[in-house]
Image (cartoon, rainbow, N blue to C red):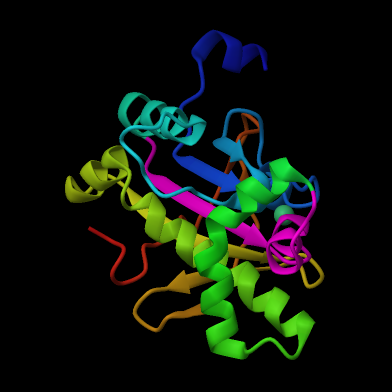
Amino acid sequence: MEKLAKDGAHPDFFVINCIDPRNGADLVFDAQPGQQFIHSQMAAIIPPYNANRQCEVGASLSYAIDTKKIKHLIVMGHSLCGGVSALVDGTSDHYIDSWTKMAGQAKTAAKTKVGANDHTVLQHETERQVVIMSLRNLMEYPMVKKALQEGRLTVNGWFFDMEKGTLHEYNPATKAFKQLNIVPPVVQDNNICIYPRPPKSPPGIAP
Ligand SMILES: [Zn+2]
């Protein structure tokens, strides 16, 4: 922290995750202080871009992409997500309901794909569809769009399977998630972790 306070932080990664304390990006990636920007919001839902409405994620994205020049943007959903449960099952909580219903199209896409007879299957599929929807919405934010066009940013949708401890990356070309082979981070002499395998943009996402 002393070094970070003196030199500042220059992370390459920006991770948007759910507020669930079991899936924080610092925990999942075993990250060190200053290594990544983390933006937490329920179910990692990215609202559709609206030029007339200021939202916190827009400010965070603008700072991280245009000022701090991050290279990799990741939206990460997870299994057993309470926010997605609220979306699937409905909730009487006004605040949660008004937030999760922004991902209504993800629920519809999941129902179309797997039906609604098996609740567990529908929950699993909706969790993944929320990542896909959020990824699509992210692409509409002007700072993301511009950085992609300039070839200085990758954008990926990841899913953390909490029970198995595995990470899965969405590939728009195959419209499927594929498990990532994560290698352990390397700890340097200065105690800063680096990841030998930076996330690669799947086809269709890379500029
Ligand atoms: Zn969650």
Image quarter where the N terminus lies is top right
Quadrant in which the C terminus is drawn: bottom left
Viewer-closest of 41 and 107 = 107
| In this view, 70 is above or below 157 | above
Q: Where, by quadrant of the figure, is residue 37 drawn?
A: top right
User: 39 left or right of 21?
Assistant: left
Residue 106 drawn at (x, y percent): 53, 68
* Point 40% across, 32% down: residue: 53
Q: Position of residue 71 (x, y in %)?
A: 37, 43
Residue 72 pos. (x, y %) = 41, 47
Q: Residue at x 59, y 71 (%)?
A: 107
Position above or below: 65 against 197: above
* Residue 46 placement, left or right of 191: left
Query: Does the segment drawn in magenta span residue 196?
Result: no
- 111 or 56: nearer the eye? 111
Point 39% across, 50% down: residue = 138
Left or right of 22? Residue 152 is left
Q: Residue furthest top?
A: 6
Query: Which quadrant of the view contains residue 80?
Result: bottom right
Please count the marks in the image. 0
Figure quadrant, ligand 1: bottom right
**Region of the chain picked out in magenta, as a range:** 70-92
Asked if the stretch drawn in magenta spans residue 83, the answer is yes
Q: Residue at x 69, y 50 (%)?
A: 97
Q: Residue furthest left?
A: 150
Quadrant in the picture for residue 111: bottom right
Q: Is residue 89 visible?
A: yes
> Above or below — where is 97 with respect to 183?
above
* Residue 179 is at least partly visible in this image: no
